[in-house]
Amino acid sequence: MSPETLGSHGAIVANTAALASLVPVALYQLGAIPHLPDPPLPLFDSDRITQSQTAHPFGIPDSLLGIASYTVTLVLLIEAPRSPLIRKLAAMKLMADGGMAAANAVRQVVVFKKVCSWCLVTAAATGAMLFTGRRYLR
């Protein structure tokens, strides 16, 4: 297996983790579950952050936008080994995902003085996507 293929597989696994971390947030934002559990530390307040106006751009829960976005990334990562053009698109999408995840994490700290634990998992998985998919960024 080539290093590019290995990078693609790692990025796919990390993308799947990001998607999985967004599902409970989506369920909470849609009212399907009553609460998002957090670690018992004062730093976390997932419920307040995910129900804020900031977490509903265009009136849409950001988790649903994230699921759609990471699904596009997943398709690009799956197809990337087949085409140089798709590899370039995957690289650009990875950079965009990384930028959005970082901006979201910083915004939580600045605006709320707290963080969403579920969002941090998404951000960490996005970082892993960037790290494992870094060969596409060259």
Image (cartoon, rainbow, N blue to C red):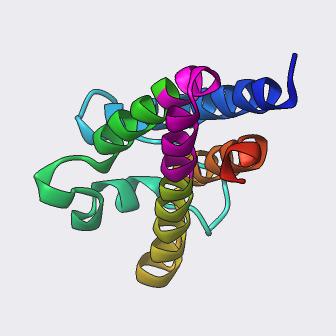
Residue 70 horizontal side relative to residue 59, left or right: right
Residue at horizontal 58%, vertical 28%?
80
Instruction: List the single residue furthest toward the left.
Output: 59
Q: Is residue 21 magenta?
A: no
Judged by its main secondary structure, the magenta piece is helix
Instruction: List the single residue furthest toward the front.
Output: 84
> Is 92 placed above or below 42 here?
above
> Is 98 placed above or below 38 here?
below
Residue 62 percent location from the top left of the image: 30, 49
Please tell me which residue lies in front, 48 or 78. Answer: 78
Q: Is residue 34 visible?
A: no
Please tell me which residue lies in front, 106 or 49. Answer: 106
Residue at horizontal 35%, vertical 54%?
50
Residue 12 percent location from the top left of the image: 64, 27
Instruction: List the single residue furthest toward the bottom.
Output: 110
> Is 136 placed above or below 33 here?
below
Q: Is residue 4 visible?
A: yes
Please tell me which residue lies in front, 11 or 89. Answer: 89
Residue 84 percent location from the top left of the image: 58, 34
Residue 1 percent location from the top left of the image: 87, 16
Quadrant of the drawing holding the C terminus: bottom right
Quadrant housing residue 83: top right
Residue at horizontal 53%, vertical 77%?
109
Residue at horizontal 48%, vertical 48%?
93
What stretch of residues is rendered in magenta?
76-94
